Image (cartoon, grey):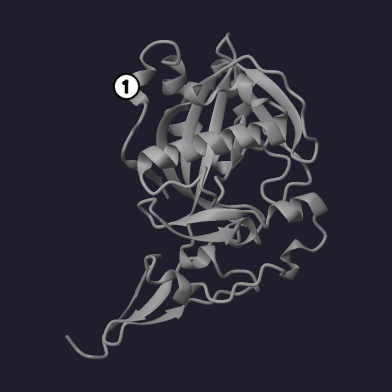
């Protein structure tokens, strides 16, 4: 091989490369200018940065993790010297997801005793995906001892605790109504999705089911509306062109949700505790 051979490849994010690819990140950027103060504060929460196999390799604020998606391209690597030069697309914020920054998330699907799914419409104040309908609750485990796990068992437990925290924060659902042991972990999905050009998501998302009858006390800074739907009712909502849905919710619905839903009372066990990550890229 020639000593000057060059190729463009996606540089994997690892514990060894993360500091080299993401040095001196500034979380006070003008990207947040004009947004709701509480939502800006929440963008400083510290997420769990992972590699593509969901192994924790670092931490980063939510703002850093949700900066926008890449155009075609990647990281140029000069094979002879192993020198890495980041691809630099136009725009002052195309820096982090562009380089493959990936973080851990969770999505809760809460069903009542009639097997109706609780949906929420995200508040207009939300920085990412405002006004869109989505599953019951979607957020990120934090990089704290009770929500971070180095192996799958501990990571699932951390996602469940994070789910309890955010169900209370967003919807006012108290922890005693959604006991830890009642959450069912199904699988993880790895996906990317743009929001508005400045922001996006690149996540390994833990899918959690729970059946519970709950009392709601909605945080209007997070959620503007809720509704329970049957499977057929949800399909009808998808036919309404005036409604917008979050990309991860549509991915899950278009792949496995309705099959899982049919097995909610009998046979869900065959879908739980999946070890492999489903890639939806």
Q: Position of residue 117 (x, y in %)?
A: 59, 20
Judged from this view, the residue extending furthest toward the left is 1
The residue lying toward the viewer, choosing from 127 and 39, is 39
Q: Is residue 31 above or below residue 274?
A: below
In this figure, which residue is indicated by the disc labeled 1?
270
Q: Position of residue 168 (x, y in %)?
A: 68, 31
**Of helix, strand and loop, which one carries label 1?**
helix
- Tell me which corner region of the image, top left, top right, bottom left or bottom right, holds residue 270: top left
Q: Is residue 199 above or below residue 266?
A: below
Q: Position of residue 97 (x, y in %)?
A: 52, 62
- Tell me which corner region of the image, top left, top right, bottom left or bottom right, holds residue 268: top left
Residue located 52% across and 45% down the image: 105
The residue lying toward the viewer, choosing from 129 and 81, is 81
In the picture, measured across the screen, residue 189 lies left or right of residue 241, that is left
The residue lying toward the viewer, choosing from 86 and 42, is 42
Neighbours of disc 1 within 10 Å: few (<14), some (14-19), many (20+): few
Note whether residue 134 is visible. no
Residue located 30% across and 87% down the image: 81
């Amino acid at each position: 091989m020639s000593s000057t051979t060059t190729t463009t490849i996606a540089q994997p994010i690892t514990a060894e490369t993360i500091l080299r690819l993401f040095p001196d990140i500034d979380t006070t950027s003008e990207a947040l200018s004009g947004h709701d103060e509480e939502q800006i504060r929440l963008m400083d929460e510290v997420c769990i940065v992972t590699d593509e196999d969901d192994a924790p390799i670092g931490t980063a604020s939510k703002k850093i993790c949700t900066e926008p998606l890449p155009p075609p391209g990647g990281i140029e690597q000069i094979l002879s010297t192993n020198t890495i030069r980041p691809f630099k697309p136009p725009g002052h914020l195309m820096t982090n997801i562009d380089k493959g920054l990936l973080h851990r998330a969770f999505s809760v699907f809460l069903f009542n005793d009639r097997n109706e799914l609780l949906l929420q419409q995200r508040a207009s104040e939300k920085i990412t995906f405002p006004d869109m309908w989505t599953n019951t609750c979607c957020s990120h485990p934090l990089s704290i001892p009770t929500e971070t796990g180095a192996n799958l068992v501990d990571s699932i437990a951390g996602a469940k605790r994070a789910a309890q925290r955010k169900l209370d924060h967003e919807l006012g659902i108290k922890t005693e109504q959604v006991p830890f042991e009642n959450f069912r972990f199904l699988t993880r999905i790895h996906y990317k999705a743009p929001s508005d050009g400045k922001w996006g998501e690149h996540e390994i998302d833990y899918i959690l089911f729970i059946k519970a009858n709950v009392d709601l006390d909605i945080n209007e800074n997070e959620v503007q509306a809720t509704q329970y739907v049957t499977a057929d009712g949800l399909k009808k909502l998808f036919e309404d062109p005036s409604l917008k849905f979050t990309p991860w919710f549509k991915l899950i619905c278009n792949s496995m949700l309705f099959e899982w839903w049919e097995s909610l009372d009998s046979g869900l066990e065959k879908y739980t505790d999946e070890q492999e990550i489903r890639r939806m890229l």
